[in-house]
Amino acid sequence: MNTIGLHAVGLLGPGLDDFDSARPILAGNAPLTSREVQAPPPGLLPANERRRTTATIRLALKVAEEATRDADRGQLRSVFASSSGDMDIIDRICDALTRPEPVVSPVQFHNSVHNAPAGNWSIATRNPAPATALSGYNASLAAGLLEAATLQLAEGGDVLLVCYDVPSMESFIHVRPIHHPFAVALRLGPVDKAPWRLELDLGGPATADRCVSDDLEALRGGNPAARALPLLERLVRGAPGNVTLAAPLGRSLNIRIEP
């Protein structure tokens, strides 16, 4: 696959409040101090829509806003990738259906669809450009990156990738063990003037790379979206190198990174 540019990153996870402040941690120069993730209400949404957002939507839109701070949000194509969607809403709807009088909240039903964060982003930015929502189980990050890179290479311009997952509720934790919220956003575009260059190569079965930091590795293993952490470590360390991600159907995605 041809080379694409990586222009900006958004990040939110335990002890990782944003990409800029997380740089020393990702570079191995500061310890990770894990704390509860607080995703703020999306500042771009109108007040009425903002009140209806879920933790999943707030998580996704926070990193999307960070990665597009200097971009034309009104024309940006986007790809939203999540392995399990809004687990909290799914849990509440399933619980409601077990009641003697099953009543599902219209707001919860509205937010249960997999493209709810993508739809809220389109509303927030008044953006008529295509927004794709996809899932690839634990390989959702690689699936989203392939989709976003293909859009960029085929049509040019900038493409926003947002990958996110929230913790599983008690009903699902044994079958879908996601233990903490995590989200990452990558704004891809032309190679010209990009601070990083990425060359993607889809290959056969291969072992996904682990994090250099043991603390970050624990985060990587606890959320499919956090599979991005080895890539982020490589970005801030400044030297060219490769990162391998698990891709759908048992394949692998090798990423060559050049500052």
Image (cartoon, rainbow, N blue to C red):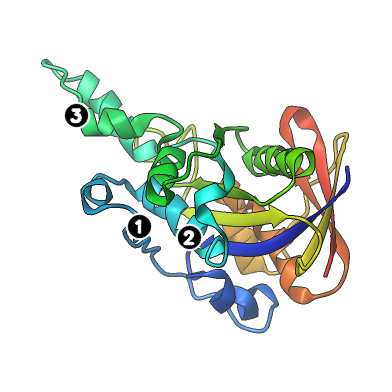
C-alpha separation, residue under disc 2 versus residue under disc 1: 8 Å
Q: Which residue is mark 1?
A: 42
Which label sits in the foreground, 3 or 2? 2
Q: Is residue 46 left or right of residue 202?
A: left
Tags 3 and 1 touching, CB below 8 Å: no
Residue 72 lies, in percent from the top left, at 55, 58
Q: Is residue 226 left or right of residue 256?
A: left
Quarter the C terminus occupies: bottom right
Q: Which residue is mark 2?
A: 65
Q: Which residue is mark 3?
A: 105
Name the secondary structure under disc 1: loop
User: Looking at the image, which residue is at 51% across and 64% down?
Assistant: 66
Name the secondary structure under disc 2: helix
Please, what is the three-letter code of the amino acid marked with disc 1? Pro
Residue 71 lies, in percent from the top left, at 57, 61
Name the secondary structure under disc 3: loop
Which label sits in the foreground, 3 or 1? 1
User: Looking at the image, which residue is at 21% across and 48% down?
Assistant: 48
Quarter the N terminus occupies: top right
Please, what is the three-letter code of the amino acid marked with disc 2? Glu
Tags 3 and 2 touching, CB below 8 Å: no
Residue 207 lies, in percent from the top left, at 82, 45
C-alpha separation, residue under disc 3 versus residue under disc 1: 22 Å
C-alpha separation, residue under disc 3 versus residue under disc 2: 28 Å
Name the residue at the bottom extreme.
29
Please, what is the three-letter code of the amino acid marked with disc 3? Ser
Q: Pick whichever of labels 2 and 1 is earlier in the sequence.
A: 1
**Which label was assigned to residue 99?**
none
Image quadrant assignment for residue 213: bottom right
Q: What crowding class fits label 1: few (fewer than 14 Cα within 10 Å), some (14-19), or many (20 or more)?
A: many
Q: Observer-nearest residue: 31 or 190?
A: 190
